[in-house]
Amino acid sequence: MSEVKITNWQGIFFIVSTIVPSALLSLPSILLKYADKDAWISIVLTTGIGMMLAVIYSTVFIKNPGLTIFDIIENKLGIFFRMIIGLLLMLYYFLDAISVLRSFIYFMVDTVMEQTPPVVIGGMGILIALYAIYQGIEVISRVNMIIIIISFLTFSFSTLFYLKEMDFRQLLPIFETSWNKIALGGVPVLSWVAEVAIILVLAPYLQHNKDVRKVAVIGILITGITLTWTLVGMVAVFSADILPMYHYPTFSVFRIIEVANFIERIDALFIAVWMGTMMMKLTIFLFSSLHCFFQTFRIKQEQPFLFPFGLLVLSFCLNSWKNQSEYALYQHFAGISYSLFFNILIPLCLFFIGFLKNRKKQVKL
């Protein structure tokens, strides 16, 4: 277990940054296609599922204090499963880092840096992430906490200005959409909320092992409230019929803010804040992939692997999708499937196997 420790609030914001940045940008347009104006109900219900997952995952560390998830797997199932699960988790976070970087590049090119080559934007993002990883998780957590606080203040401040544009009657009537469609709309939300499984990487770094459950649950709760309010606000401004037409609906909301011809074009502030949160998300996933790699093979000298890993992420990012439509299809189908498989199916199977092994031991005694 690492000697470097982070506070509970740093852990909570770590989880928030794992989910919110990319979900905030694309979730509304995806979700409204299924659940229409009742899409917020899908988020609320799925947040509840996410909190249950948080309780299950954190229980593993409460019962095995001082151990990493890889140590626990080796103790319960043997070194072979440690290697297999470690490589699978490394692959998942590696793929997620590629996807996050590609999303960041597309947004920047579409909005403010049309003439900048994607390799330059992606290269700068990778260098920033690698520098943060080189400094360690304590520095990552501190910077992330500052960025999240600034982003929450920015969104709260901006909400006051576009509050007058909201018409909450556009959310009525409630429960007009069938429960089947609400449940279907919950699938993409669940793929994001399930990333609370990052606690499997984060837990050993927390100062107090007994608080891991609190950190995971509060992290998901804040995430759910943020996504719900964002979606409600955007539907109240644009309506559920118009909102899916926007490629970046959250960005579009900020563009309409204008106060007495004095405060306007606040979308630039949104871009700056969102860039910071996406950089943290990229850093977190790249750090997690490297962490799984180091833990799986018990590597002590970590620095030599940082740049090659970053170069691989950049290379795959620039060559995996021909255009934005292809990337959107990947996100909608493969991305959701990967997330559900790696963040729910694998951890729950491990939890169930560990539970059965404990029961057998108790029976023998």
Image (cartoon, grey):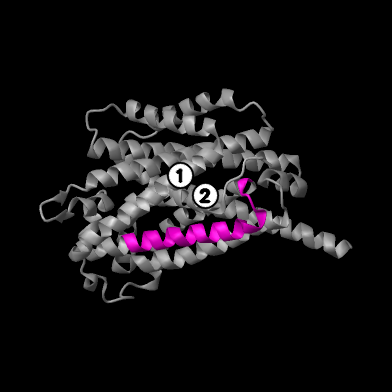
Dot 1 and dot 2 residues touching (CB under 8 Å) = yes
Q: In the image, is residue 26 part of the stretch drawn in magenta?
A: no
Q: Is residue 331 above or below residue 216?
A: above
Quadrant occupied by the C terminus? bottom right
Picture disc at residue 144: 1
Judge by depth and name the residue closer to the eye, 104 or 245. 104
Q: Rate crowding at label 1 as few (under 14), some (14 to 19) or many (20 or more) other CA atoms within 10 Å.
A: many
Q: Circle 2 sits on which residue?
A: 10
Residue for point 66% across, 59% down: 59
Percent from the top left, x then y, of residue 300? 67, 29
Q: Position of residue 21 (x, y in %)?
A: 38, 48
- Tell me the residue at 37%/30% (across/down): 122
Q: Quadrant of residue 30?
A: bottom left
* Residue type highlighted by circle 1: Asn
Res 329 seen here: yes
Q: Amino acid at mark 2?
A: Gln
The residue positioned farthest toward the left in the image shown: 261
Magenta region: which residues? 205-230
